[in-house]
Image: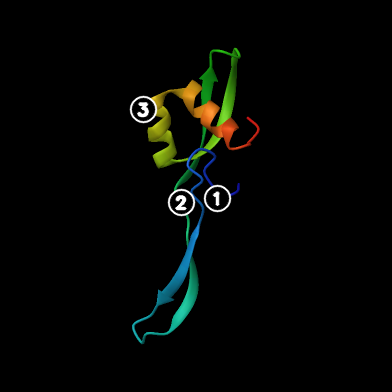
Amino acid sequence: MSAHCQLTGARPGFGNRVSHSHRRTSRRFDPNIQRKRYWLPSEGRHVRLTLSVRGIRTVDAIGVEAAVARIRARGVRV
C-alpha cells in the first residue's frame, strides 16, 4: 500500500536516525495510513479510501460526500 493519504496528501517525511555517538543514517517517518470503507449514499455504493488518521477525522467532521468531492477535485479517481 502506498504511504500517502488521498484526502490530506500526507506522505512520508525523511530524516536521519542519530545514534548515541552521533552517527547519522537515513530513516523514514511514515504517516499513520489506514484503509477505510465508507458508504457513499449518492452513488449507492461503498468506497474504500486510503487515509491518514487525520484524514479519517476530517471525514468524520465534514462528511463522506464532501471528502470524496475534495479527493476528486485533486484528480484522484474514487
How far from the left and from the top, in percent, is residue 3?
55, 50
Q: Amino acid at mark 1?
A: Ala
Q: Amino acid at mark 2?
A: Pro
Which label sits in the foreground, 1 or 3?
3
Q: Amino acid at mark 3?
A: Ala
How far from the left and from the top, in percent, is residue 19?
38, 80
- Which residue is situated farthest in the front direction here? 73
Q: Are there few (<14), some (14-19), or many (20+) residues within 10 Å of tag 1?
A: some
Report if the CB atoms under discs 1 and 2 are less than 8 Å apart. yes
- Which residue is at 54% across, 18% downward? 40
- Which residue is at 46% across, 51% downward? 31
Horizontally, is 75 left or right of 29 in the view? right
Q: Earlier in the sequence, mark 2 or mark 3?
A: 2
Distance from label 1 to label 3 (Cα)?
23 Å
Distance from label 2 to label 3 (Cα)?
20 Å
Label 2, on which residue? 31
Q: Are there few (<14), some (14-19), or many (20+) residues within 10 Å of tag 3?
A: few
Q: Earlier in the sequence, mark 1 or mark 2?
A: 1
| Quarter holding residue 69 | top right
- Which residue is at 36% across, 27% downward? 61
Label 3, on which residue? 61
Label 1, on which residue? 3
Horizontally, is 61 left or right of 51 in the view? left
Q: How many marks can you see?
A: 3
- Which residue is situated farthest in the left direction here? 20
The residue lying toward the viewer, choosing from 69 and 1, is 69
For mark 1, give the secondary structure: loop
Distance from label 1 to label 2 (Cα)?
7 Å
How far from the left and from the top, in percent, is residue 25?
48, 78
For mark 2, give the secondary structure: loop
Figure check: 27 above or below 45: below
